[in-house]
Amino acid sequence: MSDWQDWPVFDRTVMRRAFRIALVVGTVLALINHGDKIFTANLSGIDLAKIVLTFLVPYCVSTLSSVQAMRQAAKAIPNETPGR
């Protein structure tokens, strides 16, 4: 069994890309969905939780799509068998 740090989800490139996408998409969605409360500083705890989820969803989607692309790319490369 491989170490958990070797999982593609924890790949530094995947995490960096997902963070950037979540920052951009999450900001846009948070402003669209909660902009009035953000600008009037009228946020409840539930609103803050919703904003955190607004950033978490694009992070998860980006991470999962990157991992899926990495798996498909790995399948496309045939394994080399020594002596062939």
Image (cartoon, rainbow, N blue to C red):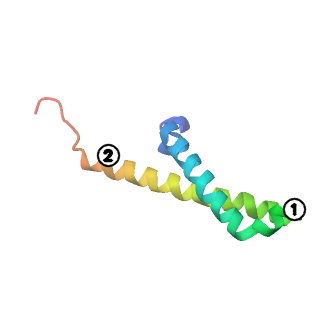
Dot 2 amino acid type: Ala
Q: Position of residue 49 (x, y in %)?
A: 79, 61
In-image side of 67 versus 83 (left or right): right
Q: Secondary structure at mark 2?
A: helix
Which mark sits nearer the N-terminus, 1 or 2? 1
- Is 31 drawn above or below residue 9 in the view shown? below
Residue drawn at the location 65% of the way across and 65% of the way down: 29
Residue 27 in the image: state x and y as whole percent: 66, 57
Residue bearing the label numbered 1: 45
In the image, taking residue 46 as reference, residue 4 lies left or right, namely left
Q: Position of residue 3 (x, y in %)?
A: 52, 35
Asked if residue 10 lies left or right of residue 26, the reply is left
Q: How far apart are the two marked residues, 1 and 2, measured between alpha carbons?
A: 43 Å
Residue 12 vs residue 75, the one in the foreground:
12
The image quadrant of residue 51 is: bottom right
Which of the pair 64/27 is nearer the observer?
27
Q: Is residue 78 above or below residue 51?
A: above
